[in-house]
C-alpha cells in the first residue's frame, strides 16, 4: 500500500477546510481529531492557509495536508509549511511531475477518462474525483471505474453526510472529501459533533 492510500484509508471523510481566521485553526483541528477525523485538507484559498497548516500540525494525531494546490510554487510553499500530503483540483504535468519528484503523497483531481489516463502515464492511480457531483456523480464514477479498475478515488464536491454512504459503498472509493464537517462559523463543539457523525460512516 503506498502512502497516499494509507492516508485515504485513515478515515472515511477528509474535511476540506477553508479557514479565514488563523487563530481558530488549532481549535478546529482539535475538534476534528477528537471527533475521529484525523486527515485534514487545508485549502490554499485563504491568506493565512500556510500558517493554518503550521498550527494544525501542532495538534496531536492530525495529518495535515494542503488542498487547492494548483501549481509548483504553491506546492513548494505547502511543503515548506509542513504539509504531509497534497491535493489538487486537477492534474497538470508541471505540478504532477514536481509533486512526484518531491515524494510527498499526492492526490490530484480528475473528472474524466483523459485526466485519469494522464495521471496513469505519470504512474499515479489514486485520484480525487472532482467535482464529484457536478461531474456526473455516482454513475459517472462507476462508468470510469470499469476501464480504470486499478484506480482508487476520493470523490469530493457536493457530497454531504446524507450522500456520502452511497459513495463509500463503491469499491474504488476509499474515502470522500467534504466541507460540511467544518462549516463557516461553527463552534468547535459543533465541529466535533459533525466529525464524529462523519467518522462513523466508515464503521
Ligand atoms: C473542494 O474544494 O475540494 C470542494 O470544493 C469541496 O466541496 P464541498 O464544499 O462541496 O464539500
Image: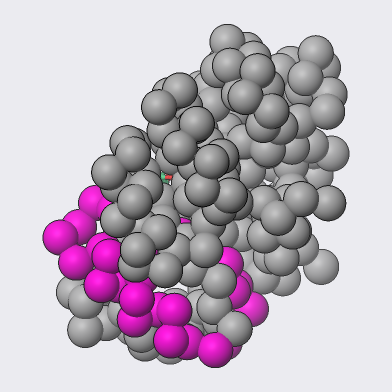
User: Which part of the image, by quadrant, shows the C terminus?
Assistant: bottom right
Residue 93's place in the image compared with 181, above or below, is above
Let me know if residue 51 is in the magenta part. yes
Look at 59% across and 83% down and name the residue there. Answer: 61
Identity of the residue furthest to the left in this view: 47
Identity of the residue furthest to the front in this view: 101
Q: Nearer the viewer, residue 32 or 122?
A: 122
Total residue callouts: 0
Q: Position of residue 25 (x, y in %)?
A: 31, 79
Q: Which residues are the magenta region?
A: 34-60
Residue 174's place in the image compared with 153, above or below, is below
Look at 74% across and 37% down and name the residue there. Answer: 152
Residue 54's place in the image compared with 18, above or below, is below
Let me know if residue 45 is in the magenta part. yes
Q: Position of residue 198 (x, y in %)?
A: 62, 67
Q: Position of residue 165 (x, y in %)?
A: 71, 50
Look at 21% across and 84% down and name the residue there. Answer: 23
Left or right of 51, for residue 98: right
Residue 4 seen in the current view: yes
Left or right of 194, for residue 167: right
Left or right of 154, for residue 19: left
Q: Position of residue 125 (x, y in %)?
A: 71, 32
Q: Nearer the viewer, residue 73 or 155?
A: 73
Look at 33% across and 39% down and name the residue there. Answer: 72
Residue 143 picture quarter = top right
Amino acid at each position: 500500500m503506498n502512502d497516499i492510500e494509507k492516508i485515504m484509508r485513515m478515515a472515511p471523510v477528509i474535511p476540506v477546510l477553508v479557514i479565514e481566521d488563523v487563530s481558530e485553526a488549532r481549535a478546529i483541528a482539535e475538534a476534528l481529531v477528537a471527533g475521529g477525523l484525523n486527515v485534514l485538507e487545508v485549502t490554499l484559498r485563504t491568506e493565512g492557509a500556510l500558517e493554518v497548516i503550521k498550527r494544525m500540525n501542532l495538534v496531536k494525531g492530525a495529518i495535515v495536508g494542503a488542498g487547492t494546490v494548483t501549481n509548483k510554487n504553491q506546492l513548494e510553499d505547502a511543503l515548506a509549511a509542513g504539509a504531509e500530503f497534497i491535493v489538487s483540483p486537477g492534474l497538470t504535468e508541471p505540478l504532477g511531475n514536481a509533486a512526484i519528484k518531491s515524494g510527498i503523497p499526492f492526490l490530484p483531481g480528475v473528472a474524466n477518462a483523459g485526466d485519469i489516463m494522464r495521471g496513469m502515464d505519470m504512474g499515479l492511480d489514486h485520484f480525487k474525483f472532482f467535482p464529484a457531483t457536478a461531474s456526473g456523480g455516482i454513475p459517472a464514477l462507476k462508468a470510469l471505474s470499469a476501464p480504470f479498475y486499478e484506480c482508487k478515488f476520493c470523490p469530493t464536491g457536493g457530497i454531504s453526510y446524507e450522500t456520502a454512504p452511497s459513495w463509500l459503498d463503491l469499491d474504488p472509493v476509499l474515502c470522500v472529501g467534504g466541507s460540511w464537517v467544518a462549516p463557516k462559523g461553527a463552534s468547535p463543539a459543533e465541529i466535533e459533533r459533525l466529525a464524529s457523525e462523519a467518522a462513523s460512516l466508515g464503521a
